[in-house]
Image (spheres, rainbow, N blue to C red):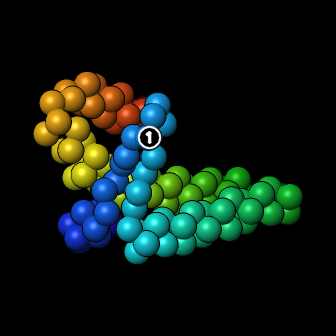
Amino acid sequence: MSFNEEDVLDESCCATTGNQRKSHHSTKTKTNLITRLNRIEGQIRGIKGLIEKDTYCDDVIHQIASTQSALNSVAKILLEGHLKSCVVERIQEGDLEVIDEVLVTIQKLIKK
């Protein structure tokens, strides 16, 4: 799922205060992410219930796959926003270390 560039650029994605880095997402983006995570949390509870009820393994595995897909969607939204704002800003400031940071992050996302 993609979203408007104005959703990403509505507010600066990342900011550094001292040694601490923080994200600053628009209210719309934050609400979207929290809604998705609440749904995923419900899916996890549902999977736990399926296990407790001795549900057929294949059915449980399908629910797990669905939950993993939902988590991947959240990660894609965050990564898109991060690339379009935080990473661009840091490159414009001459901080090319951000490229290595993003590559490590992508490696973690695609690692299975």
Query: Can residue 62 be spotted in the picture?
Result: no
Q: Residue at x 43, y 51 (%)?
A: 23
- Against 107, residue 29 (above or below) is below
Residue at 57%, 63% (x, y): give it.
37
Image coordinates for residue 87, horizontal then vertical, percent: 24, 42
Query: Which residue is at 19% across, 27% downward?
Result: 96
Dot 1 crowding, Cα within 10 Å, few <14, some 14–19, many 20+: few
Residue 29, by quadrant, is bottom left
Q: Secondary structure at mark 1?
A: strand
Q: Is 1 in front, or is 9?
A: 9
Of 23 and 105, nearer the camera is 23
Q: Splitting the image into 4 quarters, where does residue 59 fall?
A: bottom right
Above or below — where is 23 with respect to 26? above
Look at the image and tell me whether residue 60 can be seen.
Answer: yes
Where residue 78 sits: x, y (%)?
A: 38, 54
Q: Is residue 88 left or right of residue 110?
A: left
Where residue 108 sits, quadrant-wise, is top left
Image quadrant occupied by the N terminus: bottom left
Above or below, comparing residue 19 to residue 66 in the picture: above
Horizontal side of residue 63 vs 100, given as left or right: right
Residue that badge 1 annotates: 17
Please give the name of the residue rendered at 54% of the width and 67% of the height, measured from the top-left corner. Answer: 34
**Which amino acid is tagged 1?**
Thr
Point out residue 32 in the picture as x, y percentages from the top left corner: 45, 71
Q: Nearer the viewer, residue 71 or 3?
A: 3
